[in-house]
């Protein structure tokens, strides 16, 4: 959302959509009148977004630590509203271009913005896109809006996955797949599936990660694209984690062949697949296969390619280096590297997904190594509540 848009609302030059007003009220916990966008007594839920009663909402253990309270309930209402819009079935070209420009900016910001902060921006943008989708549009415009919905829903799902809210993340991935199917864009359909494979890779079940990434790979029909390379690399990593070494090696070779043939991919776009991301997936595959020397080589190369301002990928690479040490029975060194990596990540990025990978280090320690002092200290560190470190 840009300053000139807000200024236009404040001066009465334009009126925001009711869905957008609802989102702003939910986010700031206020009324439309408080925002200068309504008269006294105007209800918050004026646009029909379903209110969620906190006393009857489903509560999950530790949920208050996953997503900011002001967003938690609204995430579900926004997704259900989006699904209803997709089930229904004219924006000016310049307006559509501006929407796509804003979406591209969000895809760039996503790479370094903490997931909880990103959720608020994504939901506001989704409300704008959804508002246009409910109006009568030409077929070509409706397709572009549906593609935007698929991208936004995918980024929301990714953010929730990082925060450890796997139930809501799964729901948003389903919404993203629904939108991608409606768009008819084969590349987008494959991309959303490849992205969705990350959730079962980190949180299980692994066979779902293999299935989703394989579906994505087959959809690309071996065309040399970023999505094709991403899907093959994701399948290789999941197969390696399953212990299927032969098929994992085959997918590794295929992913590398595709990557060498595909056009250059931007390194500042969440929907790109630059070389450093390719190396991250190779690190996961080699680490799971127990090929420590190959894993270290790609880890070191990848770490040198990340900018200073980035997300959690470098931490994931270092945690995989710690897993390699665990495989080599260097228990103390492995746990110390994992603890150091975890603590060095800024708190706003130190989300549940990092805890999952750090615990993996302990799980990979053979025999009694899991009961060493270093392992116990790492376990205690990971059990501390957020904000206490």
Image (spheres, grey):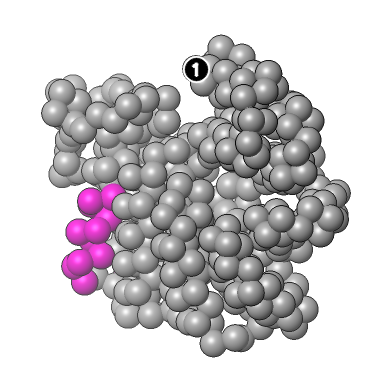
Residue drawn at 77 percent across, 44 percent down? 328
- Per the image, is 82 magenta? yes
Q: Is residue 183 magenta?
A: no
Mark 1 Cα-neighbour bin, 10 Å: few <14, some 14–19, many ≥20: few
At 32% from the left and 27% from the top, the residue drawn is 61
In the displayed structure image, the side of residue 372 where residue 52 appears, left or right: left
Q: Is residue 347 above or below residue 271?
A: above
Left or right of residue 118: residue 326:
right
Task: Residue under label 1, please give it.
Answer: 385
The magenta-colored residue range is 79-94
User: Which of the 4 quarters of the picture holds residue 272?
Assistant: bottom right
The secondary element bearing badge 1 is classed as loop
Frontmost residue, 300 versus 1 = 300
**Residue drawn 63% across and 52% down?**
108
Residue 177 seen in this snapshot: yes
Judging depth in this view, the residue of 368 and 374 nearest the camera is 368
- Residue 176 in the image, given as x and y percentages of width and height: 38, 61
The percent position of residue 281, horizontal first and vertical second, equals 67, 59
User: Which residue lies most toward the top here?
Assistant: 388
């Amino acid at each position: 959302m840009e300053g000139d848009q807000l200024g236009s609302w404040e001066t009465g030059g334009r009126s925001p959509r009711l869905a957008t007003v609802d989102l702003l009220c939910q986010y700031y916990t206020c009324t439309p009148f408080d925002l200068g966008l309504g008269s006294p007594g105007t209800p918050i839920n004026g646009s029909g977004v379903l209110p969620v009663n906190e006393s009857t909402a489903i509560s999950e253990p530790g949920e208050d630590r996953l997503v900011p309270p002001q967003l938690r309930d609204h995430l579900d209402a926004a997704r259900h509203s989006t699904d209803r819009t997709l089930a229904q079935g004219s924006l000016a070209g310049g307006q559509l271009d501006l929407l796509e420009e804003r979406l591209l900016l969000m895809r760039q910001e996503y790479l370094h913005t903490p997931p909880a902060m990103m959720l608020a921006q994504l939901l506001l943008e989704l409300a704008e896109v959804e508002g246009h989708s409910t109006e009568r549009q030409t077929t070509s415009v409706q397709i572009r809006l549906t593609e935007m919905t698929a991208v936004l829903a995918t980024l929301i799902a990714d953010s929730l996955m990082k925060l450890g809210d796997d139930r809501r993340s799964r729901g948003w991935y389903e919404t993203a797949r629904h939108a991608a199917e409606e768009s008819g864009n084969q590349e987008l359909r494959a991309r959303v599936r490849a992205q969705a494979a990350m959730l079962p890779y980190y949180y299980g079940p692994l066979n779902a990660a293999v299935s989703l990434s394989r579906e994505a790979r087959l959809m690309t029909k071996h065309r040399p694209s970023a999505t094709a390379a991403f899907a093959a690399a994701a399948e290789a990593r999941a197969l390696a984690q399953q212990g299927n070494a032969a098929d994992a090696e085959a997918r590794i070779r295929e992913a590398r062949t595709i990557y060498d043939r595909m056009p250059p991919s931007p390194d500042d776009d969440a929907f790109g697949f630059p070389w450093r991301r390719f190396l991250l997936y190779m690190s996961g595959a080699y680490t799971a296969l127990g090929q420590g020397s190959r894993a270290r080589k790609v880890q070191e190369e990848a770490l040198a390619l990340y900018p200073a301002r980035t997300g959690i990928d470098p931490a994931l690479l270092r945690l995989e280096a710690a897993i390699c040490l665990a495989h080599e029975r260097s228990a103390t060194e492995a746990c110390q590297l994992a603890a150091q990596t975890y603590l060095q990540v800024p708190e706003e990025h130190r989300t549940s997904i990092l805890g999952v990978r750090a615990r993996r280090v302990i799980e990979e320690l053979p025999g009694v190594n899991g009961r060493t002092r270093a392992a116990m200290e790492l376990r205690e560190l990971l059990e501390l509540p957020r904000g206490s470190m």
